[in-house]
Amino acid sequence: MKAPKIINIPSKKIVVDEYAMGGDLAKKGKRETDPRPEFVIDAETLPAIKDWNVGKKYKLEIEVEMVGSRIEDWGANKGKLTGNFKISGIMVDDDMDEEEEMPKAMRMKK
């Protein structure tokens, strides 16, 4: 069995936005955005979050079921494939210490 591959997603992306306001990028009709996917989960579903802190990183492994897909037909993502997923399971690494070093492949590039 192959080891899981970490897909690093950059935290900044410059996009064209004719309505962008303020800053040097706005003068050029662009703005900075965070393209990383997000999900929201409550403490009833994942009780571990009660002890977590905003801004700190945590390791999760999620199992998902793909429930749909589509090719975007407008906007910045026109022509791109998008998948829709339902989370069916979550594994939490409670043993990860704050001092523990993340593997090089998982570290954010500066």
Image (spheres, helix red, strand yellow):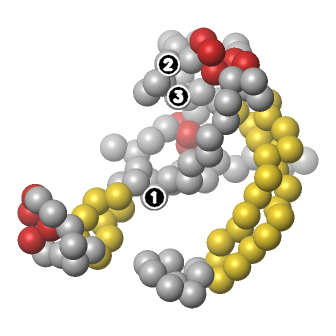
Q: Does the residue at mark 1 contact the one at mark 2 (Cβ under 8 Å)?
A: no
The spot of residue 36 in percent (x, y) is: 50, 53
79 left or right of 61 in image: left
Residue drawn 27% across the image and 74% down it? 17
Q: Nearer the viewer, residue 95 or 109?
A: 95
Separation (CA) of disc 1 from disc 2: 22 Å
For residue 46, the mark is none
**Residue 84 at x, y percent in the picture:** 73, 64
Disc 3 residue type (three-letter): Lys
Asked if the residue at tag 3 contacts the one at tag 2, i.e. Cβ–Cβ closer than 8 Å, the answer is: no
21 is higher (above) or lower (below) than 78: above
Residue 73 lies left or right of residue 27; in this view the side is right
User: Badge 3 is on which residue?
Assistant: 57
Q: Amino acid at mark 1?
A: Pro
- Which numbered marker is on residue 53? 2
Q: Quadrant of residue 55?
A: top left
User: Secondary structure beneath disc 2?
Assistant: loop
Task: Determine whether 3 is above or below 13 in the image.
Answer: above
Q: Is residue 3 visible?
A: no
- In the rendered structure, which amino acid carries the disc numbered 2? Asn
Q: Quadrant of residue 27?
A: bottom left
- Graded by Cα atoms within 10 Å as few (under 14), some (14 to 19) or many (20 or more), the crowding at tag 3 reads few
Q: Residue furthest right?
A: 1
**Which of marks 2 and 1 precedes in the sequence?**
1
The residues bearing labels 2 and 3 have C-alpha atoms spaced at a distance of 9 Å
Q: Position of residue 9 (x, y in %)?
A: 51, 54
Image quadrant where one finds the C terminus: top left
Question: Which of the marked residues, 3 or 1, is nearer the chain's N terminus?
Answer: 1
Q: Which mark is residue 35?
A: 1
Q: Is residue 30 left or right of residue 72?
A: left
Of residues 55 and 103, the one drawn nearer to the viewer in this rendering: 55
Q: Secondary structure at mark 3?
A: loop
